[in-house]
Amino acid sequence: MPKKLTITLDEEVYHRLYQVAGRGHISQYIENLLRPKVLEVGVMTYTDLEEGYRQMAADEEYEAEAIEWIEADIGECLDDLDDYEEEDSELIEVAPAGVANEAR
């Protein structure tokens, strides 16, 4: 059953839409543009995304793999830091967020 919808458009956009779709065909033109975007299979909603994250968190094997990947990535970063030498050999202590770093 068709439903009436009131939308507001910039005047220039409206005139161009009128030229493109033609008199009496604007509603059908807009529906044809929107239909695949709002009715296509696989469109993710925020609720779908939340549910997907819940399912991933409940999957212990997936979580274990994710933790291994993160730990490996952190290990590589720490190795890179060990290899890095500053020209003046000063070490800078990394402090938690909100605490100023001080050179030692």
Image (spheres, rainbow, N blue to C red):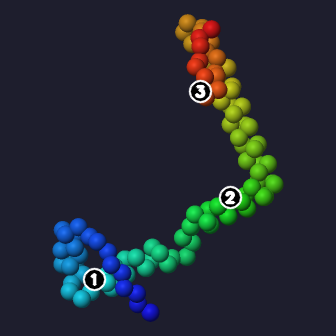
Give the residue at mark 2.
53
Q: Badge 3, how many Cα within 10 Å: few under 14, some, many 20+? A: few
Q: Badge 2, how many Cα within 10 Å: few under 14, some, many 20+? A: few
Q: In the picture, which quadrant includes the N terminus?
A: bottom left
- Give the number of the mark in front: 3 or 1: 3
- Give the number of the mark in front: 3 or 2: 3
Q: Badge 1, how many Cα within 10 Å: few under 14, some, many 20+? A: some
Q: CA distance from mark 3 to mark 1?
A: 55 Å
Looking at the image, is 60 positioned above or below residue 37? above
Give the residue at mark 3.
98
Q: CA distance from mark 3 to mark 2?
A: 30 Å
- Residue pictured at 67% horizontal, 20% vertical: 82
Relative placement, left or right, of 21 versus 66 is left
- In the image shown, does 4 or 37 lie closer to the viewer? 4
Q: Earlier in the sequence, mark 3 or mark 2?
A: 2
Looking at the image, is 93 positioned above or below residue 55? above
x%, y% of residue 2? Answer: 41, 90
- Residue pictured at 58% horizontal, 63% vertical: 46
- Residue pictured at 72% horizontal, 43% vertical: 69
CB contact under 8 Å: marks 3 and 2: no
Looking at the image, is 82 positioned above or below residue 23? above
x%, y% of residue 81? Answer: 64, 22
Give the residue at mark 1.
26
- Residue pictured at 55% horizontal, 6% vertical: 88
